[in-house]
């Protein structure tokens, strides 16, 4: 019997449109029969033709069906939750699928929640001896004591795609940056800005014990790798493989695989690093990386000889195993 996949896209997070752009690519290249469900920005679901129309419109403000949606879950062998950010990449949908007993692509509940929270994941990685950029976590109402000098970056702890991030050059601008971060999350992370940074990314496939892709490098002219730079074609240059000496590339790959295991991940992840003045720092781990035309994850594995359809096949097989 042929495997049928349910692809879930959209979501309530600020990365709704990114998710739909990713879903468009996956639907075109998935080697198994696949049906689409879209979670609208209001949290209700769109199914069948309504979901496909939302994909064509590239946004779904309102849905038709409250949660849980009226789906015949027995129809699907694997679920692919392609939901970026909160309420999709943070263990919530994964917990629902666990209760249904459905195999799904990507990390489980604990790994998803841990990687979504930049503060918690840094704590675990640092305890495991993996170098991370100095940071402090702040909640609304706390006195913003930052134990290092500016410049630094202020981020919501639980978002992706550079949403809500500010670069702060002086303490006087910290409050405004924190307010922007708190618009998206109850907790903010303040990270020291490094000098002379190169941004490196590596993909991982596997269940706990993964395999690493070649290392890629992102180059851009913007002050930092913001939302527009990430998703506007031509704004960033992606170099695969990154121009690194063999020793550095091997160290990045080994560190990515160690982090993948420490965080208890499965299926896939994209692990992002900073290389600053000869020192490596793990920036963050994305458990549901982008699959848009400008996304690094499928391009990294293409450089390893894995085509887009073959990559999707591997992900479905990993979910089943």
Image: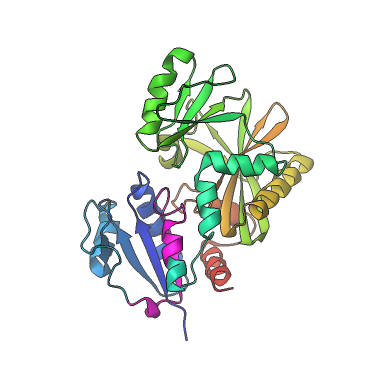
Give the residue at x 57% y 49%. 270
Left or right: residue 125 compared with residue 230 = right
The picture places residue 211, in percent across and down from the top left corner, at 68, 58
Residue farthest to the right? Answer: 247
Q: Residue at x 68, y 52 (%)?
A: 257
Colour scheme = rainbow
The residue nearer to you, when weighing 190 against 270, is: 190
Q: Quadrant of residue 63?
A: bottom left
Residue 261 in the image: x percent, y percent?
Answer: 67, 55
Q: Is residue 280 above or below residue 240?
A: above
Comparing 233 with 7, the one in front is: 7
Rendered location of residue 158, percent (x, y): 45, 42
Task: Answer yes or no: is residue 123 visible.
Answer: yes
Q: Is residue 298 visible?
A: no
Q: Is residue 203 above or below residue 145?
A: below
> Quick one: 20 or 38, which is closer to the camera?
38
Q: Which region shows up in magenta?
A: 72-96
Against 148, is 224 above or below?
A: below
């Amino acid at each position: 019997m042929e495997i049928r996949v349910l692809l879930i896209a959209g979501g309530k997070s600020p990365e709704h449109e990114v998710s739909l752009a990713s879903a468009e690519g996956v639907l075109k290249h998935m080697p198994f029969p696949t049906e689409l469900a879209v979670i609208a920005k209001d949290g209700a679901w769109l199914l069948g033709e309504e979901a496909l129309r939302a994909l064509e419109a590239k946004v779904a403000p309102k849905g038709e069906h409250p949660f849980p949606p009226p789906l015949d879950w027995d129809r699907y062998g694997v679920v692919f939750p392609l939901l970026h950010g909160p309420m999709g990449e943070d263990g919530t949908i994964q917990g629902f699928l666990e209760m249904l007993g459905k195999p799904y692509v990507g990390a489980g509940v604990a790994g998803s929640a841990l990687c979504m929270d930049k503060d918690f994941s840094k704590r675990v990685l640092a305890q495991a001896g993996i170098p991370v950029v100095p940071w402090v976590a702040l909640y609304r109402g706390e006195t913003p004591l930052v134990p290092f000098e500016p410049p630094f970056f202020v981020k919501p702890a639980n978002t992706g795609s550079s949403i809500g991030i500010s670069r702060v050059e002086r303490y006087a601008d910290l409050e405004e940056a924190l307010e922007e971060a708190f618009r998206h999350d109850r907790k903010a992370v303040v990270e020291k800005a490094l000098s002379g940074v190169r941004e490196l990314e590596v993909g991982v496939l596997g269940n706990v014990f993964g395999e690493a892709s070649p290392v890629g490098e992102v180059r851009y002219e913007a002050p930092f790798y913001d939302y527009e730079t990430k998703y506007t074609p031509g704004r960033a240059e992606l170099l695969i493989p990154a121009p690194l000496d063999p020793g550095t590339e091997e160290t990045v790959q080994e560190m990515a695989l160690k982090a993948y295991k420490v965080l208890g991940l499965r299926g896939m992840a994209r692990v992002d690093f900073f290389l600053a003045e000869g020192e490596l720092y793990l920036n963050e781990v994305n458990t549901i990386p982008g699959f848009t035309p400008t996304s690094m994850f499928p391009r990294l594995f293409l450089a390893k000889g894995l085509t887009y359809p073959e990559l999707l096949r591997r992900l479905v097989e990993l979910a089943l195993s």
